[in-house]
Amino acid sequence: MRYRTLGNTGLELSVVGLGAWAIGGAGYAFGWGPQDDKDSIATIHAALDSGVNWIDTAPVYGLGRSEEIVGRAIAEAGARPVVSSKCGLVWKPGTSKVRNELSAESVRAECEASLKRLGIETIDIYHIHWPIPDDGIEEAWEAIAGLIEAGKVRFGAVSNFSRSQLERVEMLHPVSALQPPYSMLERSIENEQLPYCLERGIGVLSYSPMQNGLLSGKVTPQWVASLPKSDWRKRNRQFTSPVLEANLELVGRLGALARELGATPAQLAVAWVLSNPAVTAAIVGARRPDQITETVAAAGLELSDETLRQLAEMIADRDAAAESMGS
């Protein structure tokens, strides 16, 4: 396992972190379908055993379930990994309807609830999950600064922010990390956010490097059709025809290149994300131990200039195909 320093925090993070979104299971709009808690705990233990030293979760993942499972797993493990969580998405008890909320009062209450579910005294990295509503990000950020002063949070971070939003909150308190989506299929942050973070010394913890499993090499049209209705990917454009076909053509080419390198498409997809000098680490989701065991190997896969050139060509071809389909 390789480790990198997160921005100016001094935290040494494994370049692959475990994402706990999917282990939240079903029961809300962005659930991943049924999930066995025993599998989730075994997956967390497997990640820690493989050298992963941080876990990313959020209250909304399973409406508290993911944080509770993470708390149970790290209590059993005995080793305290770095824990990353979030605020800004809330729901009423007994309901599954989620709404955005960035008031200072809500941020403080969400933090206390997360600490209780996780069974820890301090959250290491605490993100504003989404900058919605936009006019609330300053209030939420000042609340996080207060939580840092109170010892409830070590470092404040943001997720899904634009460059201009980063600039606005950074005027109030330092930003330790940005958590954006980043993969071969989602590269919008390359123009503004990544250069800004590199210039300002802000860590980048990219999520969905395999585009929610699409770049794993295991997805087929039949597999997508078999997903349970409670899996949010059934409604995602990347998993829907005709874009799905363009994506799977790319995955087929990735598979051929990966075999030449003695790797898997999933490992190649994660290694590609990690090859960007602005990226500190990639968040990799897993629901079973074998999934994290496979993708952790991407930490040791360093891509040559020639491999990166080949990948750039494949990505450009995929983009052209998707554009020709009107997507």
Image (cartoon, helix red, strand yellow):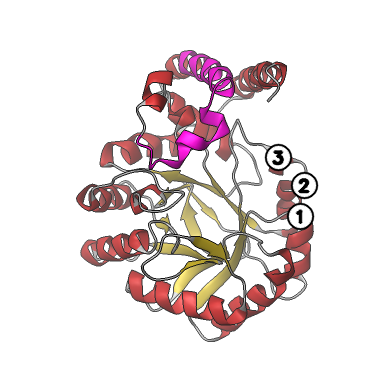
Question: Is tag 1's residue or tag 2's residue first in the polypeptide sequence?
Answer: 1
Q: Quadrant of residue 323?
A: top right
Q: Position of residue 320 (x, y in %)?
A: 71, 18
Q: Position of residue 108 (x, y in %)?
A: 52, 80
Q: Which residues are magenta?
A: 228-256
Q: Does residue 10 appear in this view?
A: no
Q: Position of residue 191 (x, y in %)?
A: 77, 41
Label 3: how many Cα within 10 Å (few below 14, some 14–19, many 20+): few
User: Amino acid type of disc 3?
Assistant: Ser
Q: Name the residue beneath numbered marker 1.
A: 163
| The magenta stretch spans residue 71 | no
The numbered dot on residue 61 is none
Question: Is tag 1's residue or tag 3's residue first in the polypeptide sequence?
Answer: 1
The numbered dot on residue 188 is 3
* Image side of residue 257 versus residue 42, left or right: right
In the rendered structure, are the residues bearing label 1 and label 2 in contact, judged by CB atoms less than 8 Å apart?
yes
Q: Position of residue 47 (x, y in %)?
A: 32, 48
